[in-house]
Image: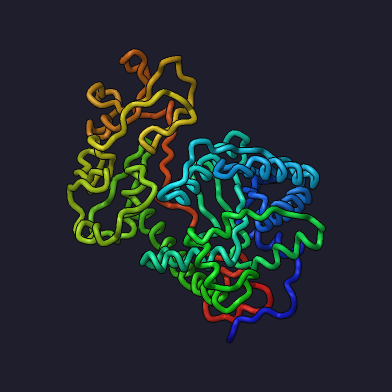
Amino acid sequence: MPLTIAGPPAPIGAVEFAGLLESLGPFEPEPGLAVAVSGGADSLATAVLVADWVRARGGTILALVVDHGLRLESADEAAATLRRLAGLGIAGHLIELPGLAAGAGLAARARSARHDALEAACRAHGILHLVFGHHAGDQAETIAMRMLAQSGADGLAGMAAIVETRDLRRLRPLLAMPKARLIATLQQLGIAWVEDPSNRNPNAQRVRLRDLRRDPNGCGLATRALVAASLARGADRAAQEAAVAEELAARAALYPQGFAVLSPGPISPQALARLIAMTGGAGFSPAHDRLAALAAAPRPATIAGVRLAPAGRLGPGLLVLREFAAIAAPIPADPAQIWDHRFRMVTAAPAGGMIGAWGADAVSTRTGLPMLICRTLPVLRCNGVVITATPALCRDFEFCPPLQAGPAPFFPLPGLAGKRQDSPIQGDAL
């Protein structure tokens, strides 16, 4: 059945938005949410909708406004957005990103810096949920970009509605929503917004693809077809990730010291990739084709900064642990820093303290663990002397890799994930 949009774009109502956002829960009582706000219509409408939702539940909202500093007008626009938010009763916080410069990979560099800064702000304010205003047009452009980049099948699922990071959950409740409905929401309330000229810069691939779609309202056939395709692929990806989580639950014992014991026998390349990514502190899983032979017949090996070795007294099977030669250099003992992409200090450290690998100072008899593991554990040193009392228990450190072995399953489109892939999607759903 064809996808249809009936009538002019309608504002997004409180009940409709509550259904979309709550499908991405759970949320704590009196929830605290942050919203990334650029000042454009998409993010500003999202902030207004989230503000109404949290107020109805006795919660709080913090709008995070990022100034990338790439245009002379950006500081004034950020200030104007904060004033507009304040006029709506929404608390705002300015984040400045110094050091970005025009050049190759600017979009990717700016996105990485923005996400890091947004998460740091949420962490500082004790906020667990960060909401973005990405809509159907953004999703369609993301899929088109990944198609041009010859992305794998997982990439063609598009942006996920839920992404769990070390410290919070990134939520995108409006991935199926036409941009026109976000604009209609602001227009109904008489709220103005700013237009970022960079969104019209033809040097950006996303802008060129947007122009080719010729669908500024996000209601056209191309947009809806791409979003519908992402739903179908997203459902497949969600099922695959659930299967991987079940497989790892049955096959791998995970330890807070950042290693795992894998039971004997073949394992799927997807599950092995996820286990390796977690253990190595990588932000992405190694390609499945690199792991196919190793997954079919697990054996001692080194791959992607991770070592597989006989488990010895820890039981049958293989240890999956960080490769010692790939471990990062020591860093100052600062709770805001992640050492080796895996461990964060959770206790107070003396001035001059450094976090690094236990290495040659490791003493296996103090831990009951094999030396292979002990060498990779984090310890605190002052003036070169280990002062951590019980390295094996990691009481001073938290294992917090960027990818967990069992993350939240891929969640493609809120409000639609429970529908059959061949069911009709009517009205303003897309």
Q: Residue furthest bottom?
A: 1
Query: In the picture, which quadrant includes the C terminus?
Result: bottom right
**Number of callouts:** 0
Task: Give 174 or 261, whichever is nearer the viewer.
Answer: 174
**Is 37 placed above or below 11 here?**
above
Residue at the image position 46 percent from the left and 70 percent from the top: 233
Q: In the figure, is residue 255 to the left or right of 5?
A: left
Q: Position of residue 330 (x, y in %)?
A: 34, 26
Q: Which residue: 40% across, 18% down?
A: 353
Give the residue furthest to the front: 72
* Residue in view at x 57 percent, y 79 percent: 221
Could you tell me which residue is drawn at 74 percent across and 76 percent down? 8
Please state if 237 lies on the left or on the right of 366 as rendered.
right
Image position, residue 344 (x, y; %): 44, 32
Q: Position of residue 246 (x, y in %)?
A: 40, 58
Q: What colouring does the structure picture have?
A: rainbow
Residue 30 visible to the viewer: no
Quarter of the image where the N terminus is located: bottom right
The picture quadrant where one finds residue 354 is: top left
Instruction: Give whichever of 243, 338 is nearer the camera.
Output: 338
Q: Is residue 232 visible?
A: yes
Estimate the x, y position of residue 300 in percent, counting from the top left: 17, 47
Pick the front one: 26 or 9: 9
Decide: is 264 above or below 254: below
In the picture shown, does residue 383 fall above or below 150? above
In this rendering, is residue 320 above or below 391? below
